[in-house]
Image (tube, rainbow, N blue to C red):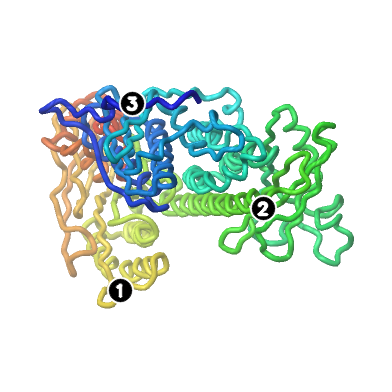
Amino acid sequence: MGAIPVQRETITRACDAPAPGNECAQTRTVLPGSPLSPGSARTLVRAALDDWASSGLPGTEHLSERLLDDAVVAVSELVTNAVVHAGTEVELSCRLEEDGALLVEVLDHHPSRAPRDGELEAPYETPEYGRGLRLVSRLAESWGVTYRTGAKTVWARLPAEDPVPLKDDIEAYAEERALERGLRVAEILAPEPQRAERERDWLNRGALSFLAEASDLLAGQLDENLVAALAGQLIVPRLADWCAVWLEDEVAGRWGYARSGDGDSGGGWAVDGIAGTGPRLARVWHGSENLIEELRRALEKEPPLPPDNHRTGPVAYPWPGDALGRRQEHGTALAYRLIAGGHPLGTLVIGRADLLRFPDEVTGLVEDLSRRVALAIGAARQYARQATISRVLQRGLLPGAVAEIPGVASALVYEPCDKGGPSGDFYDLFPARDGRWCFAIGDVQGKGPEAAVVIGIARPWLRLLAREGYRVSDVLDRLNQLLLDDATEAADAAARALVGPAAPGDGPQTRFLSLLYGELTPFEGGIRCTLASAGHPLPLLLGADGEVHTAAQPQTLLGVVEDATYTSETFELRSGDTLLCVTDGVTERRSGTRQFDDGDGLATALAGCTGLNAQLIAERIRRLVHEFGGRPPEDDLALLVLQAE
């Protein structure tokens, strides 16, 4: 990093006011000189950029995840330095220019404490600024310091385009953009090692900011392998020459480790020949890339044996000198157990050559970091478990296959918004007695376990009632009463299991269900369709001539009114006629203040599908819904197309 730019007489670009009459994306706040201020600043920047993106202000079309990440890191560093070195209140301001560049200012009221470039200091001096300004200089297009009476402002201009290209070797470790981005920032957070006499001072002054940014990086990962990769990149080469992360099952003893009293275990570490697969070596990282594979092979032969207790502090680990060559034949290695919520998740091992023992400051910092790594791994595993449960549950709530109806072509689009939890939308298409086929498409109030309980009750009852010979209106009558009884009680039980007991005075909550249900009966020359809509978006009928009209009358939601009576409509589908059934994820898809179905938007879209087959109609409506809004859909989406052949 070169000399710090300083302007004492002029005003920086970050301070320029927008032209009169032009609306500008900007925010300002005052933060106390507290260790909590960097975290508040990061939250403020994230919220501000999200609000600007939603408002469509000038320059927001250039906003990206990369710029958000850079802004959070730069603001955190500047606020941290102001809190640590000035100790006064901090004024933070951010402004977005029309070209997408973000201007950041951090003002403190101690101008006599000027920032200095750590690289220009004598070895015996205490560096006033260290990693913070180097990191900002890497991320910013330009930056500087402005002095005024009683105040000092450090400013930075972050460009819309990425100023720090990603290294090719990072791509070898993961294909996801999130990991590439995280590794690049982690590399900046953990730069080349400093001389030993300066390391202690960095640990004293920079550890807080280092841990804060490391926490943000680790907390954003939902894959345990990505967490292990980031941990190695954060530690090497700042804190150690090499690092390894083992991951294991949370059930103690599952790997078949030797227990105390089972024989000589090589000084507390695993020995060859013990039954069990052992922990998985997820990541090995070394400052010299050509040593990584040899080091990995050596470490795989000697996985760490967890102690009987759940102690997270460092314990000695055998030095793999044969794998590191003559220059690193001797050194010290330490192992840290990764434990979260009382469950052992793995082991983190660090090593440094030509060192009799790690400084206490390093062991303490790595122990703090290992706790954060363990929490991130635990969160990633919890997410993976929840996603697996949700996928299994979702498969159980939906039909395994859609029935084929003689004389009717069908097409289905089903897109749950939350990939990690059960959807509130459901569908079904199944055969009943007497040559009838039944179809349903519905939407339960809410999502998650409560919605799953209601769907788990409603769909089997639909099939049972239909196969028992009940007609459309009778099925809805009985299903309405069922929801008012069993479904409400079961859904409340699911809610209590998820979030705890209800507050005093809060009784059972009614579970609404909107449903479009019908039956199809083929006859010579067409299909007879009888259907009813209970609080659901009305189905649309597209004739072969291109005319579109609604095919049902609106009625009350299921599970709302006791002893409600439902009616049905019957009509015929002739060759080429198409029936479109959708959930509100289609009709209420938003673009700003507008919805997709405003001004009969869905009917207009369907009229444009004249002459298309069922599959093409379904795909076209799905594409139009996605293209209507600038962002991905925020609600579940389901649509069913039935076309008489």
| Quadrant (top left/top right/bottom left/bottom right) for the C terminus | top left
Badge nearest the viewer, 2 or 3: 3
Comparing 94 with 11, the one in front is 11
Q: Nearer the N terminus, badge 1 or badge 3?
A: 3
Label 2 crowd (10 A; few <14 / some 14-19 / many >=20): few
Comparing 91 with 111, the one in front is 111
Q: Is residue 501 above or below residue 632?
A: below
| Residue at x 85%, y 57% (from the top left corner) | 265
User: In the rendering, at what x and y percent does residue 119 appear?
Assistant: 55, 29
- Look at label 1 and name its amino acid: Ala
Comparing 101 with 225, the one in front is 101
User: In the rendered picture of this protein, how many numbered marks are placed on residues?
Assistant: 3
- Look at label 3 and name its amino acid: Gln
Label 1 crowd (10 A; few <14 / some 14-19 / many >=20): few
Q: Are marks 2 and 3 in contact (CB under 8 Å)?
A: no
The disc at residue 641 is: none
Comparing 8 with 431, the one in front is 8
Q: Is residue 497 above or below residue 367?
A: below
The disc at residue 7 is: 3
**Which residue corresponds to mark 2?**
360
User: In the rendering, at what x and y percent does residue 330 appear?
Assistant: 82, 40
Lateral position of residue 11 relative to residue 247, left or right = left
SS at mark 3? strand
Residue 315: tell me if it is visible. Answer: yes
Label 3 crowd (10 A; few <14 / some 14-19 / many >=20): few
**Which residue corresponds to mark 1?**
503
